[in-house]
Amino acid sequence: MMNSAPTVSPHRSRGARHGRQWRAVGWTRPLLIGAALVSAAGSLLWTAAVSGFEQPRVTLAFGVLVALGEFARIALPGGREAAPIASASAMSYAFLFTIAGDPVPHSGVQVVAVVAVGMALGELPHVMVGRPPHWGDLARRLLNVAIIALLFRPLVALIDLEGPLWWMTLLLMAVIVVGVWAADSVAAAAIRADRLRTRFGVTVRDEMRAQVAIGMAVGASAILMALSVHVMGLTTLLVFTAPLLVTQVAFRRYAQIRLTYLQTVRALSRVTEVGGYVETGHSHRVSRLAQGIGRELGMSESELLELEYAALMHDIGQLSLRDPIPSGATVLASPREQRSIAELGAAIVRETGVLDGVAELVRRQCEPYTGDGEAGPPPLGSRIIKVANAFDDLVGGSADRDRVEAVLQRLRMDTGHEYDPVVVEALATVLQRPDFHWRGD
């Protein structure tokens, strides 16, 4: 039934609690890059013109490790970039206090200079083959080392691992590592919130979850490398980079597996298009719309990934139809047909054995947002897919603004029972953004 004035159900979606407008934090990335450039240039000028490079052999050893680590940087899920070996080597150089008992006199300024040169050399091969670095990530890695050097280097003369308070040194290192990791996660979250147009608080939690494993591995390795050099000299550096190599390989494999999953899901989503069940590009458009709505409503990264999978495969149940729906527009089908398509699609997704959450989103996509039975309201992801699918079924790839506004008004008129009003308004907000290209153009 069509209602002229939408009502707010007591079963208000979780997204309503995240209904505040996104606030731009676009200054974070240029500020970090600028600070990194100033730090690198200032430290290089000071070291070259005033203080000089202390202990060239030690400087060369750590500089080479940083360069090799940057060259072997890895791409992580979510558009992230990491260089575990480079970061651990740079941090251990900042933490270094003796080499086999001999004092290490280099300053924090020299640490920043050496790390900056190592990073530049490590990035050079990538730039030469057309793979420019993520400047925000590169700046964060340099600034992390600069903060550690500025905090720790002035205290090196006070360190005595042979005395009764040796544990204070380890505690200080651990506190600095955790503090820098937390600050880096916040900076990365600010950049990500601006890039994806999503909630800052959500990206902070996402970044901390995504970086906690690799961040703690890098920090622990840096402390161990500094302690091992204190006892046995520079020869132990290669030994302690081996665990980081294993960690890096594991993260690389995880990223490849996740990419393979997404490619497989995208291939499955095209089957309905190739078979003529839906219009070309429909699944991709629904996926982009759903992700935009999900970010606007504050969904986490893991929830957005499930939503992307479910949106891409939301129409896969149409493969079981004897006679395709005209134009594949399920919004025009009867409720019984919609339910049948959703149930069959969920059954196909469950056959993968690893996407049960996605299957549930697909299964309940056709239900009214207020719920349809004892199970209660469908999940937020299902409600988002329902709105995104209905919008694209009625608009298609059209760029006509009048048609878009007419369809939005139609969805608003049916928010009393069928469509979640919060989701519909989130869709309207997303469509107003000039940088949101849901048609893929």
Image (cartoon, rainbow, N blue to C red):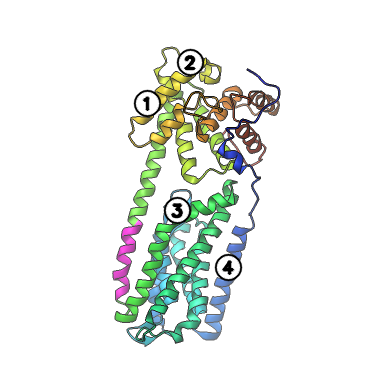
Q: Which mark is residue 367?
A: none
Can residue 213 be seen by looking at this rendering?
A: yes
Residue in view at x 35 percent, y 72 percent: 224
Residue 429 placed where, x, y %? Answer: 66, 37
358 lies above or below 92: above
**Which comes before the other along the chain, label 1 or label 3?**
3
Is disc 3 surrounded by few (<14), some (14 to 19) or many (20+) residues within 10 Å? some
Is disc 1 surrounded by few (<14), some (14 to 19) or many (20+) residues within 10 Å? some
Residue in view at x 66 percent, y 40 percent: 434
Tell me how far mark 1 sits from mark 3, CA to CA: 31 Å
**Which comes before the other along the chain, label 4 or label 3?**
4
> Which picture quadrant has residue 164?
bottom left
Residue 175 placed where, x, y %? Answer: 46, 70
At label 1, the amino acid type is Ala
At label 2, the amino acid type is Arg
At label 4, the amino acid type is Leu
**Which comes before the other along the chain, label 1 or label 4?**
4
Q: Which residues are magenta?
A: 236-248
Q: Which mark is residue 210?
A: 3
Question: Which secondary structure dominates the residues rendered in magenta?
Answer: helix
Residue in view at x 36 percent, y 68 percent: 221
Reading the image, the residue beneath label 1 is: 347
Left or right: where does residue 386 sit relative to residue 401?
left
Q: Are marks 1 and 3 in contact (CB under 8 Å)?
A: no
At label 3, the amino acid type is Ala
Q: Which mark is residue 336?
A: 2
Residue 438 placed where, x, y %? Answer: 58, 35
Q: Nearer the viewer, mark 1 or mark 4?
A: 1
